[in-house]
């Protein structure tokens, strides 16, 4: 292939003291042949997942500190999002960004969304949850 890097996501995780942190993860890829007429694909396995949920976030809610309800991938489909970890690090990510939320204990993180209604895709790592 062209030697470009693999897909990336931002990981939110909590240490043993419950302090959340942000980390960039790059996934290794493998080349997969596709069907006739479809280009060759570079596939990155991000792990097993439960179900897929489309979530609309209503405008007007003030952000507050929270933990992830379970380990889950969150794909921000519309608008930017600002994520702040308990260690003080923060990132502003554009629409289309992928986050793995693993901070299920401790202080958690705070997310601030672009004003207006927003839509996210939630992919739990296990089949339980809301």
Image: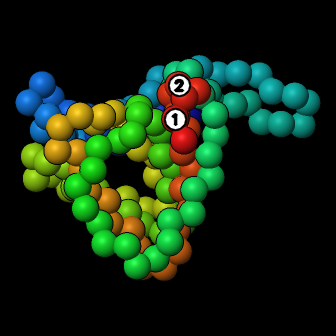
* Quarter of the figure with residue 69: top left
Q: Is residue 44 visible?
A: no
> Pointer 1 and pointer 2: residues touching (CB < 8 Å)?
yes
Please state which of the two labelled residues, at mark 1 or mark 2, is closer to the viewer.
Answer: 1
Query: 16 above or below 18?
Result: above
Per the image, the residue denoted by label 1 is 129
Return the residue nearer the eye: 15 or 42.
15
- Quarter occupied by the N terminus: top right
* Quarter of the figure with residue 106: top left
Residue 27: x and y in percent read 45, 28
Distance of mark 1 from mark 2, alpha carbons?
8 Å
Residue 64: x and y in percent read 25, 62
Q: Which mark is residue 126?
A: 2
**Number of numbered discs visible in the structure rendering:** 2
Q: Dot 1: within a 10 Å radius of its alpha carbon, few (fewer than 14), some, or many (20 or more) residues?
A: few
Q: Is residue 77 left or right of residue 102?
A: right
Question: Residue at left 28%, top 36%?
Answer: 103
Residue 73: x and y in percent read 47, 39
Q: Dot 2: within a 10 Å radius of its alpha carbon, few (fewer than 14), some, or many (20 or more) residues?
A: few
């Amino acid at each position: 292939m062209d030697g470009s890097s693999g897909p990336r996501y931002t990981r939110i995780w909590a240490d043993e003291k419950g302090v959340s942190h942000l980390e960039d993860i790059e996934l290794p890829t493998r080349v997969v042949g596709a069907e006739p007429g479809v280009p060759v694909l570079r596939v990155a396995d991000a792990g097993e997942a439960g179900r897929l949920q489309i979530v609309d976030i209503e405008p007007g809610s003030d952000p507050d500190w929270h933990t992830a309800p379970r380990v889950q991938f969150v794909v921000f489909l519309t608008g930017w999002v600002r994520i702040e970890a308990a260690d003080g690090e923060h990132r502003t990510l554009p629409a289309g960004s992928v986050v793995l939320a693993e901070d299920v204990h401790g202080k958690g993180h705070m997310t601030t969304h672009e004003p207006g209604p927003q839509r996210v895709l939630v992919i739990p790592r296990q089949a339980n949850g809301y």
